[in-house]
Image: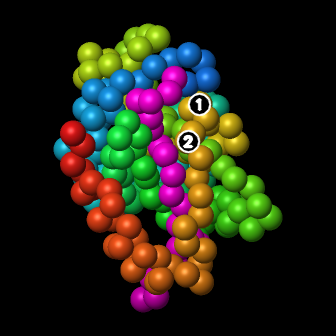
Amino acid sequence: MAKAKILGKLKGVIASAKEPSRNGRKYTEAFWDSLFNRDLFKEGIDNKMFLGELYHPDDSEEYSQIHCDDRAAVVLTDVVKKGLEYIGTFEILPTKAGQCLRNLLDIGCIFGISSRGLADQDSAVFDENIASTYDLITWDVVAFPGIKSCRLHEVSPVAESIRYKNRSEEHTSELQSPYVIS
């Protein structure tokens, strides 16, 4: 059985404790470290289950779900911490939404990335107390991310996917190991 080929790879800041969101909310380093160190997060990465869509779903019931169908455009495959920022790598999926994303990238669009999650309470500061009840769902590709620096850059179009693996291994030594959030 032939394995489906990804349509490219994207990389960029997916979370930041450095700058507040556009709505003034501050996410602390302790908040992100707590989420990224969870066993459930590691399981999601290992099994490629952080499937993101093109923009956040509008419907509240849909918002809380990860969709394993043609709505999925990307999958998060790796996160490393660099200072107060968390750098994520995404594969572009060979789905209807992934192909749409691929076409828009080909004409020069530069997308943002935004986490999707649910908190028991709203707060101006998201810290380790909120992290304990926060339900991290996934990351979605968006036009205007909540945190301005959360933009994705293509590191591997389709034709370069094999070369990306080698380049990625070289650059990995510059960053902390995956899952080691300190």
Is residue 126 positioned above or below 49 on the image? above
Q: What stretch is highlighted in magenta?
A: 1-20
Q: Is mark 1 on a helix, strand or loop?
A: loop
Find residue 160 and report its image quarter.
bottom right
Pointer 2 with pointer 1, Cβ within 8 A = yes
Q: Is residue 67 left or right of residue 110?
A: left
Question: Which residue is outermost to the bottom?
Answer: 1
Graded by Cα atoms within 10 Å as few (under 14), some (14 to 19) or many (20 or more), the crowding at tag 1 reads: some
Q: What element carries label 2?
A: loop
Percent coordinates x, y for residue 53 in the rendering:
58, 49
* Residue under the image location 36 percent in, 52 percent down: 79
Residue type at the position of mark 1: Gly
Q: Distance between the residues labelled 2 and 1?
A: 8 Å
Neighbor class of circle 2 (other Cα within 10 Å; few <14, some 14-19, many 20+) is: many
Identify whether 48 is placed above or below 143: below
Q: Is residue 72 magenta?
A: no
Left or right position of 131 against 89: left
Residue 163: in sight, yes or no? yes
Q: Say what amino acid the circle numbered 2 marks.
A: Cys
Residue 14: x percent and y percent? 47, 43
Observer-nearest residue: 3 or 81? 81
Of residues 64 and 51, which is closer to you in this image?
51
Q: Please give the name of the residue rendered at 51% of the width and 52% of the height, measured from the top-left corner.
A: 12
The residue carrying mark 1 is 146
**In this picture, residue 9 sits left or right of residue 49:** right
Residue at 44% across, 30% down = 18
Q: Where is residue 71 in the image (x, y as percent from the top left)?
A: 60, 53
Q: In this view, does 50 lie above or below 125?
A: below
| Residue linked to disc 2 | 150
